[in-house]
Image (cartoon, rainbow, N blue to C red):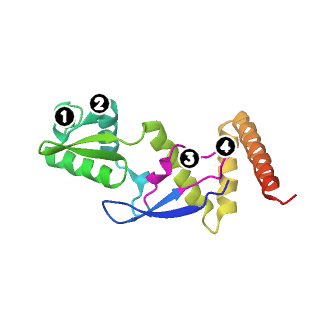
Amino acid sequence: MNFPLVPLTHATSQSRVFLFRASAGSASLIENGLAAFFLRNYASAQLGPLERQVFHAVWVRGTATVREVREDGKIWQTYPTIMTTMDRLFKKGLLSRVPDGRAFRYSARYSPQELERMTAVNSIRQLLGSEYSSLHLSYFVEAVSTQDGKLLDQLQALVERQRAQLKAELKKGEPE
């Protein structure tokens, strides 16, 4: 399915945000407004190990301040390092924050599964958007087939279902 890109403005950094929208009634690769995750100026797929640890620590707690993340004892970094990391995750759109006294209380905007899904979708879109998209697609099919033959059958079924859905949408749009 082809999702049009709609430019919006990110409130904190004034960088461009691209939101994918699906047509009404169509199955969307990105559900529940999660596409706001794709901040153009941030390589969200490139989270470092500390960013992943901090994101997970906040997700597990539900909400957390920098001090709470540090006091958990699972991340052995200084307070300023954790504070900087949480601020970067906020600027990347992965954490939200509200004032809590003299600090901020952070919460994860996405589950770890949603983060993985969006990272995968973003990476695939980048590959398919290049001039070598057919080559990348053939590599993907090759990788799927070497992984598991049944997975290749599932991929074929997904492609056929998507093709049928696109044909049905085209018929709806045609004048009668």
Between disc 2 and disc 1, whose residue precedes? 2
- Residue 68 image label: 1
Judging depth in this view, the residue of 7 and 29 nearest the camera is: 7
Mark 4 residue type? Val
For the record, the magenta segment spans 20-39
Whether pointer 4 and pointer 2 mark residues with C-beta atoms closer than 8 Å, the reply is no
Image side of residue 4 versus residue 168, left or right: left
Mark 2 residue type? Arg
Mark 3 residue type? Ile
Between disc 3 and disc 4, whose residue precedes? 3
Between disc 3 and disc 1, whose residue precedes? 3
Q: Write down the quadrant of residue 131 in the picture.
A: bottom right
Whether pointer 3 and pointer 4 mark residues with C-beta atoms closer than 8 Å, the reply is no
Q: Which residue is mark 2?
A: 61
Q: What x and y, as percent, mark residue 68? A: 19, 34
Q: Which residue is mark 3?
A: 30
Q: Which residue is mark 4?
A: 144
What kind of element bears circle 2?
helix
Q: Gap between marks 2 and 3, in whole Å?
A: 25 Å
Judging depth in this view, the residue of 132 and 72 nearest the camera is: 72
What kind of element bears circle 4?
helix
Q: Gap between marks 2 and 1, in whole Å?
A: 9 Å
**Residue at 23% over, 36% down:** 75
Mark 1 residue type? Glu
